[in-house]
Image: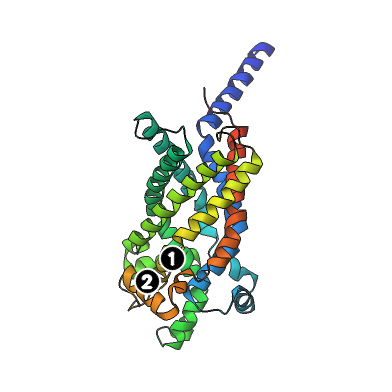
Amino acid sequence: MSVRELRDKDAEARATKQKLLQSNRTVIAASSAAVVSVLAGFPFDSIKTRMQTHHYDSIISCVKTTYVEEGTKGFFRGMIPPLITVSIIKSASFSIYEGTKKALVRDGVFKNDTIQSTMALSTVSGSVSGAFIALLSCPLELIKIQRQLELILLKNQIASGQMPIHEVTEASSWKSAKQIVGRKGIFGLWSRVGCHSARDALGTGIYFGSYESAKRLLSKDGSNSGPLVHFMSGGLCGMLSWLFVFPVDAIKTNLQKDIMLEKPKYSNALECASYLVKKNGVRGLYRGLNVTLLRAFPIHSLNFLVYEQVLRVIPPLD
């Protein structure tokens, strides 16, 4: 083979590789952002889950109790499934979001030339993405919650006589999944999926809607935005979406916490909400919000910063 032929073959291989990257740029960017977000934010998420479902005097009290009883690994309990699968879910979420946006603009349902139209377009597209992605993420989040709370739940089950102490064994995410399927059937992995879908449709709609609006406000039209704009817009949209969706998330978490009990405490979301409000007032629906907001700004800032920068490194197809 001549030198020229080798050069042509090498150029063809590079072109094929570049085309492959370009056609999957949204997937690559979303996956990169997702992994960074999970690694940086999981300890905060673990504390949030504990504070939503059990009583602690403060964030510091929760952190201290977790560390004393479970050590450092208590903050990362249940992280492996989301770390492995989050790229798939995040990629699907962003892909559905971008695809829905393009379809709505192409069909003339929305324009994208003002802040108001951008907000409406992004909110509707985000809600569609969130509702669909809930079907994928519900089993993973259910397992994550069971893992995050497993030692607390075991202590309660032993104290109430539901679990003999000699039957206690070291669990894993795979074991948790098998236990749920064994007791509830395969569809048990989608327990409380209705509440989960409501949370994700609302939260994702606000998330993308506020991000695109903030990006447009902080730059001329959103197209000339830089890393600082992406960072600030991501942090703001993360905090805003959690402010609206947190009560729904608290209800969902408390419902999913008890799915392995023979007699769950709540039969539906309304009963759960009523109990939480009756026990702790309306603020009972916001227990753990402070740690969530503390986590939201840096995590979602990093999420969109990484996402947008990877998109810039990989140019779109012509």
Q: In the visual, does 272 lie left or right of 93?
A: left
Q: In this view of the protein, which residue sits in the foreground, 306 or 82?
A: 306
Question: Does label 1 or label 2 sit earlier along the sequence?
Answer: 1
- Badge 1 amino acid: Pro
Q: How far from the left and from the top, in percent, is residue 296?
A: 57, 57
Q: Amino acid at mark 2?
A: Ala
Q: Is residue 286 at least partly visible in the picture? A: yes
Between marks 1 and 2, how big is the CA–CA gap?
Answer: 8 Å
- The label on residue 300 is none
Determine which residue is flagged by label 1.
Answer: 247
Q: Relative to residue 72, is residue 86 depicted above or below?
A: above
Q: How many marks?
A: 2
Is 91 positioned to the left or the right of 180 in the image?
Answer: right
Determine crowd level at label 2: few under 14, some 14-19, many 20+ residues with C-alpha closer than 10 A. Answer: many
Q: Tell me how the rendering is colored.
A: rainbow
Disc 1 to disc 2: CB gap under 8 Å = yes
| Residue 171 shows in the view | no
Residue at the disc numbered 2: 273
Dividing the picture into quadrants, the one containing residue 244 is bottom left
Q: Residue furthest right?
A: 3
Residue at 59% from the left image edge and 32% from the top image edge:
314
Residue depicted at 56% across the width and 51% down the height: 236
In-image side of 307 versus 190 (left or right): right
Q: Residue 176's spot in the image, x, y percent?
A: 45, 67
Looking at the rendering, which quadrant does residue 298 occupy? bottom right
Label 2 SS: helix
Residue 66: x %, y % from top left: 60, 75
